[in-house]
Amino acid sequence: MTSPGRSTPEFFAVAFVVASCGAGVPTPTGPTTSIENFHTEMELTTLSMHVRSGQAELRCDVVGDGVGDSPTLIFLHAGVADRRSWSAVTRELGRTHRTVAYDRRGFGETTYEPESYSHADDLLAVINALGGEKVILIGNSQGGRIAIDFALAHPERVIAMVLVGPALSGEAEPTSLSGPASRLAAVIDAADEAGDLEQVNRLEAHFWLDGPSSTEGRVGGSARALFLDMNQRALSARSPGEERPPRSAVDRLGELAMPVHVVVGELDLQFVNERGQRIAQGVRRGTLTEFRGAAHLPQLEQPDAFIREIRQFLSRVDREE
């Protein structure tokens, strides 16, 4: 079964010129950063750019300038999505914070040449290019794993984290599932072996977006159309090369001293939710919320509720810090 933790290629960055950008526009720094376009809508600055990391040009969307000393929020997508899975969230949170969502290698509009790479190093390149010293990381699934790995490697750069249905480096995925999840996974595997990527994409929308125990098509409209487009690109992408494996995080969660808020979906896989609970309990300052009626990507299903959840967490972090 194809997993939302699939490893796929990263994307690209260009040389940056800011002379005509004007005041209030985020000012990425360094020779490996470039602006593709920017505009201001109702005083909300949006910027599309690329950041180079190794042989990859990572496509980034930056929304907002931040208010006062508010920290930058970095959004890390799932392995069945890309940066666009965060668009509704970043547009709203961009009114008070600078928000950054980027495509990893093998997703969305990032370009790359196959090579040995590290997701944590790519994330560091994005943060450095944007001039961010300390940030808040918000990661979904595989993006949650990368957030944890980065925070363990660079704790001084991370103020807090929100982990949505997170994966965890060093933790083995279950070798078998049960009930509807098992039956659906078997059908996905068969379609994958037959090379029918269109069928794989449709079935993975059922598995990850609807939830395997839910009726196919439970989530419809623009959210489903976006999922199918994002995942189709990931399924069709060429290999980015070999990811340099990070150290296992299983026995290191207690090293994470920053606030960590875990979000799980009621309709997600049981082992994903159990892992989320272990992470919330294993870090020093962990909390957990379950989104009722949502599966693996609650930010797509329930964006307004998700935004409220993030805002409440940001207020808590601001008070505690």
Image: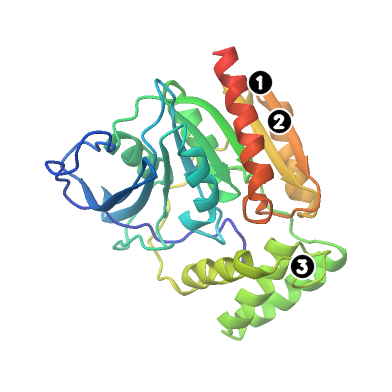
Q: Which of pointers 1 and 3 indicates the residue nearer the eye?
A: 3
Front-lying residue, 294 or 213: 294
Front-lying residue, 150 or 209: 209
Determine whether 182 is above or below 281 in the image. below
Q: Identify the image quadrant of residue 251.
A: top right
Which secondary structure lies at badge 3?
loop
The amino acid type, in three-letter code, at marker 3 is Arg
Determine whether 191 is above or below 83 in the image. below
Separation of disc 1 and disc 3 at Cα? 35 Å
Q: Residue at x 35, y 60 (%)?
A: 110
Q: Residue 280 has which mark?
A: 2
**Side of 249 relative to 60 (left or right):** right
| Residue for badge 1 | 285
Q: Residue at x 84, y 68 (%)?
A: 180
**Side of 232 relative to 242 (left or right):** right
Which residue is situated farthest in the top direction here? 320
Which residue is situated farthest in the left direction here? 19
Position in image of residue 271 (x %, y %): 77, 49
Q: Identify the image quadrant of residue 176.
A: bottom right
Front-lying residue, 53 or 162: 162
In the rendered image, is residue 251 in sight?
Answer: no
**Side of 149 relative to 310 (left or right):** left
| Residue for badge 3 | 218
**Side of 130 relative to 198 (left or right):** left
In the rendered image, is residue 30 in sight?
Answer: yes
Q: Residue at x 54, y 68 (%)?
A: 231
Q: Quadrant of the N terminus?
A: bottom right
The amino acid type, in three-letter code, at marker 2 is Ala
Front-lying residue, 308 or 4: 308
Mark 1 is surrounded, within 10 Å at the Cα level, by few (under 14), some (14 to 19) or many (20 or more) other residues, namely some
In primary-sequence order, the first of circles 2 and 1 is 2
The amino acid type, in three-letter code, at marker 1 is Arg
